[in-house]
Image (tube, rainbow, N blue to C red):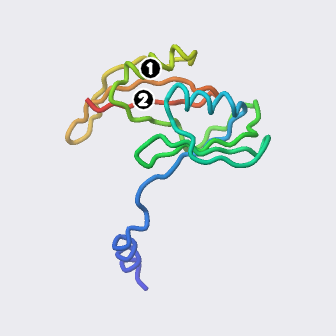
Amino acid sequence: MGGGLILQNFEEKKLVKGFHHVAMRVKDFDATVKFYTEVLGFKKSISWGEGDERAIMLDAGNGNHLEIFAGGSGEAKPEGAFLHLALSTDNCDEAIEKVRKAGMEITIEPNDVVINSNPPTPIRIAFFKGPDGEIVEFFQYR
């Protein structure tokens, strides 16, 4: 079979519909789950395991999920391919104020940016460190 046929079949079947979840291992499971549910409004979907084997899937809406695993160490995490978690919002300023009030460290205040794409894409973004040190971005189309 040629490579073109495989690609054609893949496109016809639409095997990949989009992203389902992003997963992270954290050192403080309870604090991380509390932040994403109580501050950002994610809904608990399913959970399993006990102790350092605990995990939970949180529903962020629109078919998007965050999967959190317990058992992370307090050591610095190696830099990997993923740089940050970007969350879509309709109000970047309101979102960053909510996480600021929850005690999160704001690393980049809300600011307007135009992505130099064709056509140019105006956005408003802000970044903060989550409860386990993860870098999170609020992303708003303008």
Q: Is residue 102 above or below residue 45?
A: above
Residue in view at x 51 percent, y 15 percent: 100
Q: How many marks?
A: 2
As drawn, the label of residue 37 is: none
Looking at the image, residue 86 sits to the left or right of residue 48; the answer is: left
Which quarter of the image is occupied by the N terminus? bottom left
Task: Single out the residue that lies furthest toward the bottom.
Answer: 1
As drawn, the label of residue 96 is: 1
Residue 40 x/y as whole percent: 49, 29
Task: Single out the residue that lies furthest toward the right.
Answer: 51
Density class for disc 2 (Cα within 10 Å; few <14, some 14-19, many ≥20) is many
Which quarter of the image is occupied by the C terminus? top left
Instruction: Tell me whether the residue at label 1 lies in contact with that at label 2, contact meaning CB atoms closer than 8 angstroms.
Output: yes
Query: Where is residue 133, by image quadrant?
Result: top right
Q: Of the residues shown, which amino acid type is indicated by label 2? A: Phe
Looking at the image, residue 27 sits to the left or right of residue 116; the answer is: right
Q: Is residue 123 above or below residue 22?
A: above
Residue in view at x 27 percent, y 35 percent: 116
Looking at the image, residue 119 sits to the left or right of residue 26; the answer is: left
Q: Of the residues shown, which amino acid type is indicated by label 1? A: Ile
Dot 1: what SS? helix
Residue 25 x/y as whole percent: 67, 40
Density class for disc 1 (Cα within 10 Å; few <14, some 14-19, many ≥20) is many
Q: Is residue 85 above or below residue 124?
A: below
Residue 125 or residue 29, whichever sits in front: 29
Give the residue number, with chain letter if any, for mark 2: 138
Residue 82 x/y as whole percent: 54, 42
